[in-house]
Structures are given as structure tokens and as C-alpha cells.
Amino acid sequence: MIKNSIITLIFYFFASYAFSQNINNIIIEGNNRVSDETIKIYGEINLDSSYDEKKLNQIIKNLYSTNFFEDVKVSILGNTLKINLKEYPIVNQLTILGEKSNKFKEQIEGIISTKEKKSFIKSLLSKDIELIKSMYSSAGYNFTKVEAKVKKLDNEKLDLIIDIDRGSKTKISSIKFIGNNYVRSNRLRDIIVSEENKFWKVLSRNVNFTDTLLELDKRLITNYYKSLGFYDVKVQSNIAEINKAGEVDIRYSIDEGERIIISKITTNLDDVFNKETFLPLNKIYKEYIGQYYSPFKIKKILDDLDSLISANNLQFVEHNVQEEVVGDKISITFNIYEGEKILVERINIFGNNITDEDVIRGELVLDEGDPFTKLNLDKSVAEIKRRNIFKSVNTQVKNGSENNLKVIDISVEEQPTGEISAGAGVGTNGGSFAIDIKENNWLGRGKGLSFSLDLDEESVKGTINYNDPNYNLLGNSLNYSFSNTTNDVPDRGYENSLITAAAGTGFEQYKDVDVFLGLEINYDDLRTDDTASASVKKQAGNFTELAANYRFTLDKRNRVYDPTDGNLISFGQSIPIYADSASLSNTFQFNQYHMFSENFIGSSKLFLSAINGIGEDDVRLSKRKGISTRRLRGFKKNKIGPLDGTDHIGGNYASALNFEGSMPNLLPENTGMDLKVFLDFGNLWGVDFDSSIDDSNEIRSSAGISANWKSPIGPINFTLAQNLLKAETDETESFSFNLGTTF
């Protein structure tokens, strides 16, 4: 056996030696555009070198990798290395037909490998065609046809035409959920972004099927289930074949898993830190022990931890979260340790073709020269994303000029920032129309500009608003607005115009505490006719007011949209600085939310508002208080409270208390309807400009059912209310509805 192996090795040695040749001459043929020297460099070919089969194969491989040559042949004749080449033809002109959108054309030119003045390679062209189809598919065009046409000019050049028929967008015919035993399907439809194609959603982009929306929906469903304590929830999606109508059915399969309770929360602290610094965490932990797990609760604890680190001016602190699930219990450990002492050397910004770089830098939590932590980098990315002007934000951390320095590359992808929405409504309280146009990145400065128009049977209101969300690079917003409202009330004998210009700033003073400060100037012109009451005629004329506004808000809700837990407290005032008719306005609001179960979500809301004339001045008619029909159901709009003859004129004081219970799973899902029960209390009283007016200072109350129905003609809200307490002068309605949509 050993003897045979030795013989084999000797054979291969001499065979290899016999093949190996020393080259003293090189012949290259077939290259018209690429020089001999370039070929030698790319092929790593040298004279007076020994070449065997392995080296010849490497030359072939090197030359093919240049994408210059369609065919490469290499041979050795004596001491001569001969290379025969066939060059790829060159794309003289590339034309894209069938696509009128410059935006799509630019995207196509950016993603394909085939370019003008570059080699024409059929295999790459085939890949380019698939890339183009994929690009259109991501935009909702799943029937796109792409055809490549080649026109040869000579042996070396050709013209390439890419003919595109994007077709129509694929619409979502239906969305169904399987395995959702705990959460109702209608609730999941409210959570996801995708929408079923209905005729009233003609301007909605979300009725178009894309893989991007599909993946986003899965994340949203997953996050919602996890927020309810379903730690191991799994969501899968599948689609049926696209039918002839260009529509597709989507199915989401949900494995809910078990609902997990937080049993234990501990801190694992490095010895370098003072334990007393982090003792306040223990009090925070106690709030969550015994509650269902939620990543939002973990996020709140991390926010409190970061606040402690910042308040104690600790640097180079890192932390992570360890979670261990046993049965239906989860134990959580927050590891806090000293991180590597690294500084930020430089921050580079890429991809901001429209947006000014200062807009992005203004959102960064860390700056050049600051201690580098992944935590602050993640916070910076989150702040940039909050501006809602970028499609994606990516980061790359690289080594700097020294070991303790890092360079951060931030790459953004801009997205369309203009929005247009319109809405229409009709109901027992009359009809309305609204249009809203927004640009969220005005002139690339990250500022918002919007215009809105609201119309109903008695009023027209136009508003222009300008907002700078971070005007001083400290997270403070600056807002300017101008509005003009015209009310024409012929049955009450008056018409008035109210012009308002305002400026204000908002900022987070403490954790969850937001402050708003502003100035407002109002010009009120009230015109009357002979049918107006004496008290209304008394207020006729022009009036000007300059007022200072402030508002404090404590927001402890688990989410802004459709909260299920927590509370919101708000108090604000409007204080006159100069006024022809001065008045002081106060508003207080308290909302409390609690999820008793997935089938019953309760809320209570308290609203208090008051306005009082200063000195001898009476409160203007346009500034008097009212109670909206959403706070006091069962009563007609503006038809309660003090009465001047037969006209309700509003009051100096308004109050409302609402109790509401949502029962999303009460009715069968195929009805497409959610129900709420409510109990409302309210009062509107106080008259300061005429003691003869009937004040009707009585508590009003109603109870009833509210239903939201996703009907074939659009969303409809029905309210059935029974008045429990009312004044004789109030005008009531036991039934109301509203039809309309926003798109």
C-alpha cells in the first residue's frame, strides 16, 4: 500500500513538471478595444514565468471576470502563450420605452447592470429584466411585461431598447385571518396597513398589493399580539393566485401561543457602579410584576434607566435585556455594565439629495467628540425616523484614525413627503366636506406646510399652517398658523368673520410632560340684521384681541392611537394681553383607559372649560363655549344651554363626563360592525351679557349604543341614545349617523 502511494506521488510530480512551461513570448488576438497591456494586467500574465494548467485556468477566469470578453481561449505553443479573445459588443444607446414617469426611469437606470458604453452581456440583461419586474412588483404592478430589443450597428456596437408595459396594479380583493382566537379579525384589520379594495377607497394606496405591505402587516400583527402578552406569537402569510381581474386574496395564519405574565424583574449591575444610583428601578419594577408581558413595558423601563444614567451624568454605560420564559411566566434581567471607552470621531451623512444635512444632524443624540454608545446611536436613528421624511435610515460604524475612535456613516433614503386627503360626511346633523394638503419636508428643510378647508351648512374655515418640528435643535417645535372662519346663520340673524393668526412652540419639559406656549391675535367682525336678538345686536361690530396661550399635557397612555391603558391629563389657558373685549379661558381634560379584556375596553373622560369676561367686558359670541356631539350624544349640535329667545347662544361654562365601553367581539365578525356602550353627562351654562336670558343651568345625561359599520358604501357611524336628563329648552335626537371616509 505504501509502495503504491509513493509511485502515485512520483507520477503526479513528473506529470506536473512535464506540463509546466516557461514563457518568453505572448500573442494576443481578437482584442479591438482593450489593449494588450490591460489584458496582461487583468490576466496577471508575465514573461519568463512558468505556466501549468492551473495558471492557464486562472488567466481564463481573470479575463472573464472583467466582463469585457464573450469568449476566452488560452494555449501554449512551445514557449509562446497564445490568447484568443472575442469581445462583447458595446451598448451604443439604451432607450427605455413605455414608461413615461421620470421617477421610474431613474430607478430602472439605477438598478440595472446594462449601461450605455458598457459591454452587452445577455445573462446580465436577463437579470436586469427580472430586477425591473421586481421593482414594479414592489410598487404594486405584478403584471409588468418587459421586452428587450437589440439592434446591431456592427460587430462592436448595438442599440438596446427596453420596452415596458407596467400593466395595472394588483388590488387586494380580501383579507382574512386564521387562528386568531383571542383577537377579533376586525381589530386586526384596524392594525394592519393593507386594505381591501372598495370603491370608496379609490385614492388609497393601501389597496394595492405589494410584498412590502405584506411584511409590514406581519410585523404590525406580531407587535400587537406581543403588546398583549403573547410572547411567542408567530404570523405567516400566503396569497392566492392573482385572478383575471388583477386581484389577490391575502391570508394571515396566526399561532397565538400562550399569554405570558411577568413574574420577576432584576438588575445585574457592574461593580464599578454605585448600587444606590439604580435603586429607583426597584420601585418601577414593582409596577409591572404580575402584569402581562409587553415589549412596550420593557421600553418604558429602558427609558427610565436611560433617564437615571443621564441624570447622574454617567458615561460609557451599556445595558441589555435578558428574558427567560418558563411555562406562562417570564423573568427579566437588566444587565448594566461599563462599556468600552470610545469616542465619535466623525459622522458622515449620505443619501440626502433633497433634505438639508442640518435637518438630520439636528436629530442626533450624539455628536462628534461625544462618547460612543450603541444606545445613543439607536436613539438618533429613532429620532430621524420620527420626522417621517425618510423611507429608511441605516447606519454603519467603522474604525477611526485611532483605536478608541469610531466613524459613523448614516445613510438615508428619502421618500415622497407630500400628502393630500379629502373627506366628506353626511348625517342627521347636516353635511360637510374637508380637504387637507400637506408637505412635510418643505424646501428640504424638514419643515411642514399645510392647507386645509372645512365646509358645512353654516360655516367655511380655511387654515394655513407652518411647522418646524426642531427649530432650535433641542427637540422644540415652532408653529405658525393663519385661519379665516365665516359663519352665516340667517335663522339667528347674524353673520360673522373670525380671522386668527397664531404662533407657538411645544416641547417635552419632563418625561411624558409636554408644554405648549403661544401667542394668538384674533379679529372678529359680527354683522346683524333685523331678525337678530337684542343681545346679539349688542355685540355687533369689530373686535381685536391679542392673547397668550399655554398648555401642559401629561400623557401616560400606552399608545396615542386607540389606547387601551393609561391616562392623559391636560390643562390650558388663554390670557388676553390686549383686547377690545377681554376674556380669560381655561380648559381641563382627563382621560383614563383600561382593558378589562380583549372583549371589553373601558374609558372615562372628563372635560371642563370656562371663559370669563375681565372687568366690565362680556364674552364675545364667537368665543363662547359649547359641547360637541361626541361629548354629549343624544342632543343636537349647538342646541343646548342658554337661550336667547329661540336661539341657543353658548355658555360661559361647559362640562362633560363620558363613560364608554368598547365591545369589539359582541357581534359576529361577518357583520363588519363594532359596538360601544356609553353614558354621557354634560352641562352648558352661564350668561354674562344679558341677565334676562334663560340660562337653563341643568345637568344633561344620555345613555346608548354606538356602532361603527364598514359598509359597502363606506364607513358609517350610528348612534342610538336615550336622554336621561335634559332641560325643557334643549333640542334632542335619539338617532344620528355619519357617512364618509378619508382617503
Image: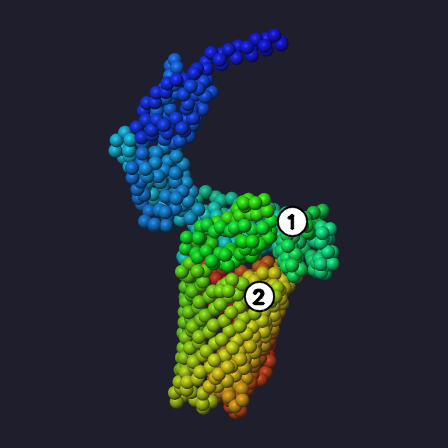
Is 514 placed above or below 252 here?
A: below
- Please indicate, yes or no, whether residue 306 appears anywhere in the rendered image: yes
Q: Residue 695's quadrant in the figure?
A: bottom right
Disc sitting over residue 339 in the figure: 1
Q: Quadrant of the C terminus?
A: bottom left
Q: Which residue is at 45% across, 87% downward? A: 539
Q: Which residue is at 47% across, 46% downward? A: 211
Residue at image mark 2 = 508
Q: Position of residue 613 (x, y in %)?
A: 53, 86
Identify residue type, mark 1: Gly
Q: Earlier in the sequence, mark 1 or mark 2?
A: 1
Q: How many marks?
A: 2
- 171 and 293: which one is in front? 293
Q: Which residue is at 50% across, 54% downward? A: 193
**Badge 1: residue crowd in 10 Å (few <14, some 14–19, many ≥20):** some
Q: Position of residue 263 (x, y in %)?
A: 73, 53
